[in-house]
Each structure stands twice: as structure tokens, then as C-alpha cells.
Image: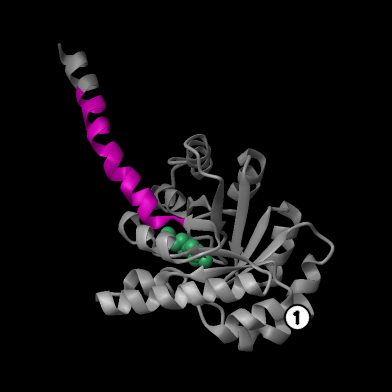
Amino acid sequence: MQLLVNIDHVATLRNARGEGYPDPVEAAKICEQAGASGIVFHLRKDRRHIKTEDVYRLKETVKGDLDFEMAATEEMLTISKDVNPKLVTLVPESREELTTEGGLDMEKVFEDFRDRVFPAYADTDITTSLFVDPNEKDIELAAKLGSDAIELHTGTYANATTEADRNHELKRLKEGAELAHNLGMKVNAGHGLNIDNLIPLVETVPHLNDISIGHALVSSALFDGLDETVKKFLLIMNTATN
Ligand code: PXP
């Protein structure tokens, strides 16, 4: 099992002021130095966080696994093949959403992925992964396409508010992971994971390979570093006025 850090929200903060900092590529370096096995980014059509130039800089800098999360548009197919990351994770994307809202509807995308998307990667070394809900049908169709991996959508589990719902979602994830593994696919997982809900997930769900965590990790980092940073600024001010 390995941690891949999603650095999209470092770019969100950078873009909020149109400045060059905080730099998601610098954040990626720190994550890897701290032991993360790789970096995930989502290049969206509207470039609301990661920009195309970030992608090429990440490719140059990241030493571990680089996971290019994207919608299966022609533009993204072209960029991803040019960048040649370790992994491409295909996700549904709609303009209005704040974040990815669920797994791919495999029945809906099956023919398009079979005829257009998977052939595009056939002559590459890129590992393909499909972001799916823990449904038997979606997982079976992912295997039928010949996908190397799936990423189980953990958002419904993360958002469950009662213990019964949480346990129900954990059971679905466990069964989904077992099915995908038995069908010969690697099992990744992500969305909405945090320090609290990560523990039952990794204790319950077998065969987990890459765990992708972004929002909660970047948020925790902010609070873990705030105390030290305030002291640093105060030290400068006090030193300057003494
Ligand atoms: N996996 C996928 C497919 C995602 O779309 C996202 C969100 O960008 C994540 C993982 C990470 O989710 P979070 O930011 O909630 O940790």
C-alpha cells in the first residue's frame, strides 16, 4: 500500500491570488521527501487549479509515481500521452461540480472507452485506471475493457454520517476490492479520505495499492504548520523593532 498525495489544492491557493506561490511542484517535492510514493494531480478542462505547465514541471520533478487524473477528452488524451506519466486515472468531470462527484458510469462510457480511449494508450507504457464506485457491474466492465487498475471511489464512505452507513460502505468497498483483485486489476482508492476515516478503510479493505489523498492532507498541513509560521513572522517583527 502506498500514499500518493494529490497537490491540486496547493495550486488552488496559488491561483486565488494569481501569484507564483505556493508552488504545487515544490509541494510535490516535500511530499516525496516525507515518504509519499508519488503525486496525483487533476488537470481539469477549466484549469481551475493545476495548469498545463505545472504538469510538465511535475513530470520533470516527481521521482515516484505520477498519477494524471483526467476526463477522457481528446485534449487530455493528447496531453497525457505527451507527458507519459506512470498512471492515468480516468474520471467523470462536469463543469459545475466542486470536485469529482462519483465514479464513472461504466455502462455509459464503455463503447467510447473501448473504441477510442483504450486504443489511444495501447502503444504506451502508461498504466490505466478507472475511477469507479464499488459496484459489481462497473468493476466487471472495467475488467472487460482491459484496464490495469481501478480506483475505488471512497467518497460515499467518507460522507457517511451513521455507523451503519459507514459499515455498509466499508463492506461494499471490501467486496469491490476483492472482485477487482480476482479479475486481475490493481486496486487503488481515494476521495474524501482523512486521518480518521483512513484507519477503518485500510484495516477492512484488502489489496489496496495506491491511496490518493488531497484535500484533507493539504488542510491538515496548513494547521500543523500555522503555529510555527506565526512564531516565525513574530520573531522577524520583534527582531526588527528591538
Ligand atoms: N481520487 C479522485 C479520482 C479524485 O477526483 C480526487 C479529488 O481530486 C481524489 C482522489 C482526492 O480526493 P480528496 O481531495 O478528497 O482527498
Q: Position of residue 228 (x, y in %)?
A: 26, 31
Q: Is mark 1 within 8 Å of ligand 1?
A: no
Q: Position of residue 136 (x, y in %)?
A: 56, 84
Residue 224 in view (yes/no): yes
Q: Position of residue 45 (x, y in %)?
A: 57, 67
Q: Is residue 83 above or below residue 145?
A: above
Q: Measuring 52% from the left and 42% from the top, which residue is drawn there?
A: 28
Residue 137 sits inside the magenta stretch: no
Q: Is residue 166 above or below residue 235?
A: below
Residue that protrudes farthest toward the left in the picture = 242
Screen quadrant of the C terminus: top left
Range of magenta residues = 213-234
SS class, disc 1: helix
Q: Is residue 171 left or right of residue 2?
A: left
Q: Is residue 5 left or right of residue 113?
A: left
Q: Measuring 78% from the left and 81% from the top, which residue is drawn there?
A: 115
Count numbered badges in the picture.
1
Question: Which residue is tagged 1?
Answer: 114
Q: Position of residue 221 (x, y in %)?
A: 34, 44
Q: Is residue 168 above or below residue 46?
A: below
Residue that protrudes farthest toward the top in the picture = 242
Q: Measuring 62% from the left and 88% from the top, which residue is drawn there?
A: 108
Residue 120 sits in which quadrant? bottom right
Closer to us: 121 or 171: 171
Q: Is residue 181 left or right of residue 154?
A: right
Residue 94 in view (yes/no): no
